[in-house]
Structures are given as C-alpha cells and as structure tokens.
Amino acid sequence: MAISPTTQALAYLLSAVLFILALKGLTHPASARRGNLLGMLGMVIALGATLMGREVTHYGLIVSGIAAGAVIGAVVAARIQMTALPQLVAALHSFVGMAAVLVGIGTFLNHRAAGGLNGVLMGEIAAGVIIGAITFSGSVVAFAKLQGLVSGRPVRFKGQHVLNALIALTAVALGVHFGLTGSLVSLALMTALAFVLGFTLIIPIGGADMPVIISMLNSYSGWAAAATGFTLGNDLLIIVGALVGFSGAILSYIMCVAMNRSIFNVVFGGFGDSGGASAMSQAMAKGVKSAAVEDAVYWMEDANRVIIVPGYGMAVAQAQHAVKELMELLEARGVEVRFAIHPVAGRMPGHMNVLLAEADIPYDHVFEMDEINPEFPSTDVALVVGANDVTNPAAKEDPGSPIYGMPILEVGKARQVFVVKRSMRPGYSGVENLLYYQDNCSLVFGDAKEVIEGMVNALKAGH
C-alpha cells in the first residue's frame, strides 16, 4: 500500500524530530537509554515511510537485504566485546561510505541510460562518491589499527601532506570535469583517488588520536549520507546526514579542546612518535615501586575518599563489574568513592562511560575531568585501573613529550596512587608515563580483573 507524498513528508518530519531528541538524550548517561529508543523509533518510522513510498515498486531484493542485514547485525551485536566497540564503529562507518559510493555510481548509470542527467545531479553524485570513498578507506585503516591488524603508530614520510593535497585537488578537478561532461572515465579516476586519499589521510594518525579520528570519520559518514540524500532527492536522508555530520564534527572539536590539540593537527598529523628524553630518563633512573593487592587494600579501607580512574586496560580485562563490587565494599566501610573520566579515555568517545553504565555504577558517582581534578589534592587514594596516557604528567611537565599540553587527570596529586597495570609497556600513544616514577605511586602488576577481584576478596576477608 503506497502512501501519499504528503503523508511520507509528515512521517519524515516526525522521524527528524525523534532523531534530534535522540541526540539530546545521548548527551547524558542518565538519558542515553531513552535517546537510543527514540532514535530506533525514528528509524522504524523512516524506513516504513520510505518502503511505502510510491517510488518503491518491488520489495524482493529490499526485504532480502533487510533480513540479511538484521541477522548479521544481531549476531555481531550479541558477540561483540565492549573492547571491540571502537573498531566496530569504524567498520560501520566504512559501510556508510561504501553505500554512498555505490548509490552515486548506480544513480549515474541509471540516469545515463534514461537520459536524465544534468550538471546539478552529477555534482551531487561527485560529492557523495568522493566523501563516501574517503570515509570507506579511512575507516578501514582505522579498523585495522584498532584491531591490531597493523601497527597503531603513525606512518609518515617526506612530502606526505603535499601528496595528500595533490590527490585531493586532482579528485576535485576530476569531479568538476565529471559534473560538466558526465565522463565515466573521470568518475572512475575520481573514485579511485578518493579511496587512496582516505588511506593516506589516516595512516599518519597515531594511537592517542584515534578517539578523535573515530569521531571525525563519523562526521564524514554523515556528510556522505547527506550528499546521497541530495542525489536521491530524499529530504530525511539530508537531514539525518547533516545531524550526524555536524554532531561528529562538534564532538571532534570538543575532544581536541580537551587534548589541547588543533583539529587540523590531528587530521593531518601524527601523534606519539617521539618523546621527551631528558625528563623521562631522569624519572626512569629512580625506578618504579611495586605493591601487592593487600597494600592497596590497606590504604583504601582506611581512606576517607578514593577516586577510581578507569582506562582501556579495564575494558580489555572486563573488570568493570569487579570495580563496582569494590566500590560497594568500600562505601559500606564509609569510604567516599568517585570515578574520574577523561574525555578521550579508551579508544572512542564515551568508552569508559559505557563500561561503567554496563556495570550499573550510579551516574552521580561518575565525574568528568574538569569536575574531578580539583578533588585529587584532597583524595587519600587514586586507583588507576588500566589508564595510561590520560594520567601522564609528561603532558604538563615535559615540553619535549608528544603529549605536552594535553589536559590530564591529575591523579599524581592524590596522597597515594595505585596503578593496576599488566606490564610496563607504554600506552597507545607509545609515550612512557612519568606518573609511575613518582614517590607517591606504586604499581600493582597483573590482569585488571584478577587484581580488582583480589582486592574485593581481601576486603571481604576483613583485611
């Protein structure tokens, strides 16, 4: 049953409002679940209105594609580990990019056969294909780095920025030529160069910048969707693409501000490929102090305030539930427990917030960096669970460090710091952490889940 264009437009308007409310809900952990539900409802309405539109006449391939995608998505969602969410997000971005490329090429071929090509349409196709191809190949590189298929360190070479500029200008020139002439050769070359540009733009990005890059690729996927909306004449796709594009760009900017980094420096540079030798060598000469689980428990059970700093190591070990139990046991002893979250902790925006929410840790226990930093000097114990770069004092003290100038969680100001860490390997940025060599810092070596469970058992035994 086909619906009228007016009914479809009203359904699209309702979907757009729901998507905006979904974004609003996702701005705070307490309303994130509602935001997700509103977004899902909006998508159901959007898909239903599209499928019942007059332009859809055959449902066989559409239903088959939806069914296959639903099965694959359900299986992936059921099996995916929380630590793999960043690379999953990168993979999903690549799908959006490739969809934009295929829709653009398919639209061109269909209209060429029907004789309905014009300069405006071909310009829209060129924009969608270029942005989509960059999104696809860039997301594939990000996925490979996050998955460990290739090194997460920056890959840089002389003349890299000049090469990227030449590729971009050539791709745009071919896009203009395609828009003016409808040349299939120009379309093919333009698409190929855009794929190459996505690859060359992401390979110089180092590990510490990956959360920003994931957010930026999200923005790219939105602009690819918006361009595809213009190509297909679909108003809702334009609106949704613009929402995703702007929100991803704004989030990327916010994260760069949190890191005291220029967004252009992140997108076009590398991070973590060198370090400050002088400050680090002096610190390493002192060596680190290791501590047993019982040592940390002794300090925490006698503390008035404990701040827990979660990081990627907690995600890898799936220690969030053990951390919650530790929190409950400490609070039962009258200890005030808070959680400190850095904007770029983990491998994607909000990674630590999601993990803590999964363990049902109360939202009012979780504080962002700017809120919690003034509390560290009056804190008895700071417990760092698998976090590294976001606690590194080199960002404040070592001008030669690649992370110099990045705001950090100032855990070193606490009376005593315990860091749960599997080994002395540096964080994802490849920069050694000066915190480990401070006099008030001790390292508890081991798997984060096993160490935290050991602390829980020690507290239960009445250490």
Image (cartoon, rainbow, N blue to C red):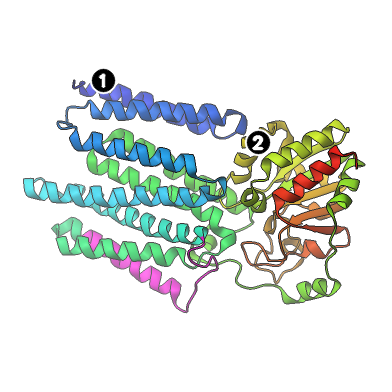
Q: Nearer the viewer, residue 9 or 70?
A: 70
Mark 2 secondary-structure assignment: loop
Q: Where is residue 27 in the image (x, y as percent from the top left)?
A: 57, 35
Q: In the image, 266: left or right of 386?
A: left
Q: Earlier in the sequence, mark 2 or mark 1?
A: 1
Task: Tell me which secondary structure the magenta stretch mostly adopts.
Answer: helix
Report if residue 71 lies within the magenta region. no
Q: Residue at x 85, y 31 (%)?
A: 332
Q: In the image, 419: left or right of 67?
A: right
Q: Position of residue 454 (x, y in %)?
A: 79, 47
Name the kind of residue labelled 2 in the image.
Ala
- Residue that numbered label 2 is attached to: 359
Quarter occupied by residue 138: bottom left
Report if residue 173 lies within the magenta region. yes
Q: In which quarter of the image is the N terminus?
A: top left
Numbered label tally: 2
Specify the segment rendered in magenta: 148-177
Q: Where is residue 320 in the image (x, y as percent from the top left)?
A: 67, 42
Asked if residue 117 can be seen in this view, the reply is no
Asked if residue 261 can be seen in this view, the reply is yes
Name the kind of residue labelled 1 in the image.
Thr
Nearer to us of marks 2 and 1 is: 2
Task: Tell me if residue 295 comes above or below residue 9 in the rendering.
Answer: below
Q: Position of residue 267 (x, y in %)?
A: 49, 60
Q: Quadrant of the C terminus?
A: top right
- Residue that numbered label 1 is attached to: 7
Task: Tell me if residue 35 comes above or below residue 227 in the rendering.
Answer: above
Q: Which of 413 and 418 is in front in this view?
A: 418
Q: Nearer the viewer, residue 360 or 36?
A: 360
Q: Which residue is drawn at 83% across and 75% down?
A: 285
The disc placed on residue 380 is none
Quarter occupied by residue 354: top right
